[in-house]
Image (cartoon, rainbow, N blue to C red):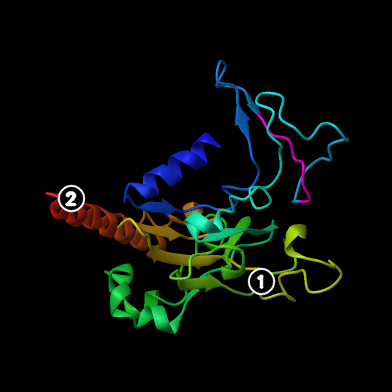
Amino acid sequence: METLDAYEGFDKRGKSLMYTGGNGFYWRSVTDPKRPHRMEVRRADVGARTHELPAGERVHSLNGQLGGLWRSLGRRPNLLFGIGSCVSGKGPGRAFIPTEEALNDPFLSWVWKELSESSKKPLGAQGLAVGASGDELDRLDFGIGSPSNAILIARSERHDDHFMLFNEELIFPMIGTLGSTSPLVRSDMVYYESARGGAVFSVGSINWNNCLAWDAYQNDIAQITENVIQEFLALGERLRRCAL
């Protein structure tokens, strides 16, 4: 919780956040303040999990707080990062496909800086895990708290049936749960400007970082990552000057 508090506090001070992972803010976890190398995670919910807890074992012993998904505990990652974890799979990764709106929006022209027209579609088609969208995925979802001004820049497509929706995404998990049958099985690349003057950029995929070093960092994923960093540095400088 302290980590999530730190990110929220950073955002509230008008700073910018870049989230280039997936499934990063899923379970509540607790660290021992006296022994910070020790961590406790009580999976007291219906999320994708490796074990079940018996009755009476769902409260953290370190601080007395109920364990479970941040989604169920009132702090959905969508509220801050624009996206939330929804899918896991061990099949090959897939590329991101930019939306036509994002490609042609002058407001987002900095995203595509130094990228040729041919390299904009698809994005991240090559990497150590094949594609930039893979392993664990996060998706934009306005229904559970993604900011209304969040812009969908790109999304992955055509994941195979090694990828499946998390069970909290479903009511009756009988059909339409796999990559080939559900449009909800995807990563979303999202950008939005926050209320305090900063901005948030999220990609929703663990595989993103597996693509950075491809071809000695001379690739589209590395270039977009650099573009976002440069834009956030410039944004911070503009805000600093306005505060003088």
- For badge 2, the amino acid type reads Arg
Q: Identify the magenta region.
A: 40-46
Q: Please indicate, yes or no, whether residue 18 appears anywhere in the rendered image.
A: yes
Q: Quadrant of residue 35?
A: top right
Q: Residue at x 69, y 58 (%)?
A: 89
Q: Quadrant of residue 149?
A: bottom left
- Disc on res. 184: 1
Q: Please indicate, yes or no, whether residue 124 appears anywhere in the rendered image.
A: no
The answer to whether residue 79 is left or right of residue 176 is: left
Task: Pick whichever, 170 or 63, lies toward us.
Answer: 63
Screen quadrant of the N terminus? top right
Measure the alpha-carbon separation of dots 2 and 1. 40 Å
- For badge 1, the amino acid type reads Leu
Residue denoted by label 2: 240
- Mark 1: secondary structure: loop
Q: Residue at x 39, y 78 (%)?
A: 102
Crowd class of label 1 (few under 14; some 14 to 19; many from 20; radius 10 Å): many
Q: Residue at x 53, y 64 (%)?
A: 146
Q: Quadrant of residue 222?
A: bottom left
Query: Could you tell me how many numbered marks the image carries?
Result: 2
Q: Position of residue 58 (x, y in %)?
A: 78, 35
Q: Is residue 148 magenta?
A: no
